[in-house]
């Protein structure tokens, strides 16, 4: 399950960041929604965005609708990690 969520968010992250890189912008934002395999929102999930080059990390928690936002993100390669008790 965790691999599915990570892959989904990595694909979303690329889709969100790639257009920004083409437009020569040096920063942007990352946002998304965490859902379980049945399509239900996952509130209270811990979401971490890690810069793979510098190993710096930003953390947030999903809201009641499973949404999260990282408002200011420099252009780089990132790993998105989602964790929630009861999911593996």
Image (cartoon, rainbow, N blue to C red):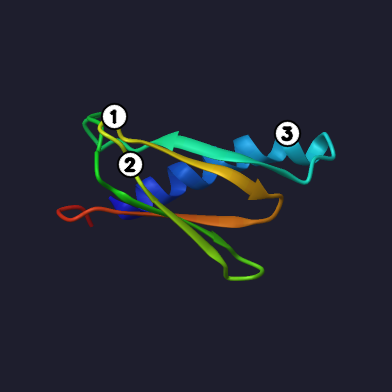
Residue under numbered circle 1: 65
Residue 17 lies left or right of residue 45; in this view the side is: right
Residue 12, label in figure: none
Which of the pair 85/69 is nearer the observer?
69
x then y, percent, for residue 60: 40, 50
Q: Residue at x 28, y 50 (%)?
A: 1
Mark 2 to mark 1 CA distance (whole Å): 7 Å
3 vs 2, front mark: 2
Tag 3 and tag 2, C-beta contact below 8 Å: no
Residue under numbered circle 3: 19
Mark 1 to mark 3 CA distance (whole Å): 26 Å
Label 3: how many residues lie within 10 Å, few (<14), some (14-19) or many (20+)? few
Q: Quadrant of residue 30?
A: top right
Q: Residue at x 34, y 38 (%)?
A: 34
Tag 2 and tag 1, C-beta contact below 8 Å: yes
Q: Earlier in the sequence, mark 3 or mark 2?
A: 3
Label 2: how many residues lie within 10 Å, few (<14), some (14-19) or many (20+)? many
Secondary element at tag 1: loop
Quadrant in the picture for the C terminus: bottom left
Residue 62, label in figure: 2
**Residue reaching furthest right?**
24
Secondary element at tag 3: helix
x then y, percent, for residue 8: 44, 42
Secondary element at tag 2: loop
């Amino acid at each position: 399950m965790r691999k599915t969520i990570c892959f989904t968010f990595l694909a979303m992250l690329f889709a969100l960041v790639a257009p920004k890189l083409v437009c020569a912008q040096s920063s942007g934002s990352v946002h998304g929604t965490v859902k379980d395999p049945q399509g239900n929102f996952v509130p209270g999930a811990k979401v971490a965005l890690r810069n793979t080059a510098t190993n710096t990390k930003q953390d947030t928690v999903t809201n009641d609708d499973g949404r999260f936002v990282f408002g200011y993100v420099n252009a780089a390669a990132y790993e998105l990690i989602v964790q929630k008790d009861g999911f593996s």
